[in-house]
Amino acid sequence: MVKQLRLGLFENAQANDSGTATWRHPDNGRYLFDKLDYWRDTARMVEDAGFDFLFLADAWGWADVAGERPEICSVEGLDLPRLDPAIILGALIPETTRLGLVATGSTLLEPPYAFARRMATLDILSGGRIGWNVVTTGTADTAVQGFGVPMVGHDDRYEMADDFMQVVYKLWEQAWEEGALERDKSGRFADPGKVHRISHDGKYFRSHGFGNTSRSPQGTPLLLQAGASPAGRAFGGKHGEAMFVGSGTVEQLRGHSTAIRQEAVANGRRADEVKILSAFSAVIGATEEEAQRKYASVAEAQNPDVTVASYAWFTGLDLSAYAPETPMSELYTELSQTQVARFADKTVGDVLRDWHGHGVGARPVVGTAEQVADRMIELADGADLDGFLFSPVIPPASTKDFIEQVLPILRERGAIAEPSDEPQTLRERIMGTSSPALADSHPGAAYRARR
């Protein structure tokens, strides 16, 4: 029996994403990222197609090379400006009925009390369709400059994130019990016996008092995470319900899946209580030759001067300061170690050439719709994947191509379910459970209010 796969769309509330600048391409519509019509049309398109969720990545920082933001960043709209993804998701709630809505949020840059209220509000208004992609930075060390807070070391950030999680679990799971709101005009609005004061004194965060919102449909929004370092995998195995992994070979992806599931088991959870979704991109043509021509047009739309600035944005490393033959294994950063480790067997010159093609994003499969569908099923079966996070090379044109040409093939083969009008929370939809609540084995469930 073919495994039924989960499918999300990766988007970004700015003109460009993934360290590339393709806004000049004639088929690129996201240069209008600050127009609500773009997001409404995208959300409706993927909901109608049967996608499980729309994922909006985020970053607070900006590119910095040798202490300066290169002019090319403004010329090409590489890193700024951008919009707040949570507000976009709020605007999309009334425009959709089934689609999950996922936003990135950093545990480094804002207080957990304020963040918990924002996410609970979205989950309440959407009827339980919200997910949180947990990140431990704002992408670059420039983010901490903007917030006026000190940078925290890579592994220490995961310790900080664990402290952050304890606060939000208490606010989402403990502060208000399910059914606390009665809204009885002849009696009482809320049952005081089901409203609880929380108390937290951690290494990084303190919080005492009452949750600012009542319990949302899911309690804790669906938790997604993308850490690929040992510390990131350990955090994801403990807290994550869906883990994003990058693109790669079957063998590479299977290694990630196995390591993440082992971490889940080590934390007292079942291996299948963490869903693994791989990044995936495609350039689709009627023939391989047409697909290659389309992909070449993407590279031609990009300014190669963006490469150095965008790599520095994600890693803090100025590759222009190193000789091309320098092994990447000699470089170190406290920022995204994933973006160094993925090139461990390459040189600086290799990375500069490779990054120009797709930046931090997945290397696209370039071919016919049949070839793309074949590759997705091969990866899912061979690497023990539960689904994919589709990243359009050119938004929204690449998404439309995928929906019109590849999805019918995947449905015919039984890998993707037909769209359903059945109301579900995002957790029920992604995890395949009959309850919107965290699994009892999840560490967040331990904070659940007890009668």
Image: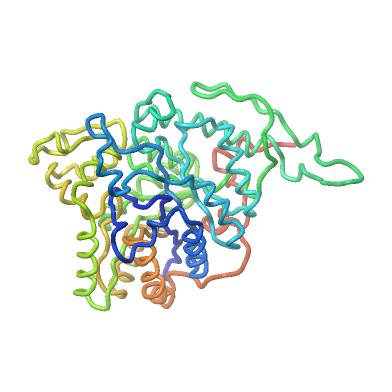
Residue in the foreground of this view, choosing between 368 and 440: 368
Q: What's the coloring here?
A: rainbow
70 horizontally vs 401: left or right: left
Up/down of 194 relative to 278, above or below: above
Q: Quadrant of residue 8?
A: bottom left
Q: Quadrant of residue 121?
A: top right
Residue drawn at (82%, 42%), measured in percent from left and top? 189
User: Which quarter of the rendered picture does the N terminus lie within?
Assistant: bottom left
Give x and y (percent) for residue 173: 64, 39
Residue drawn at (37%, 56%), measured in percent from left and top? 31
Give x and y (percent) for residue 188: 86, 41
144 horizontally vs 314: left or right: right
Residue drawn at (30%, 75%), measured in percent from left and top? 370
- Residue farthest toward the right in the current orientation of the protein: 186
User: Which quarter of the rendered picture does the C terminus lie within?
Assistant: top right
Give x and y (percent) for residue 6: 46, 61
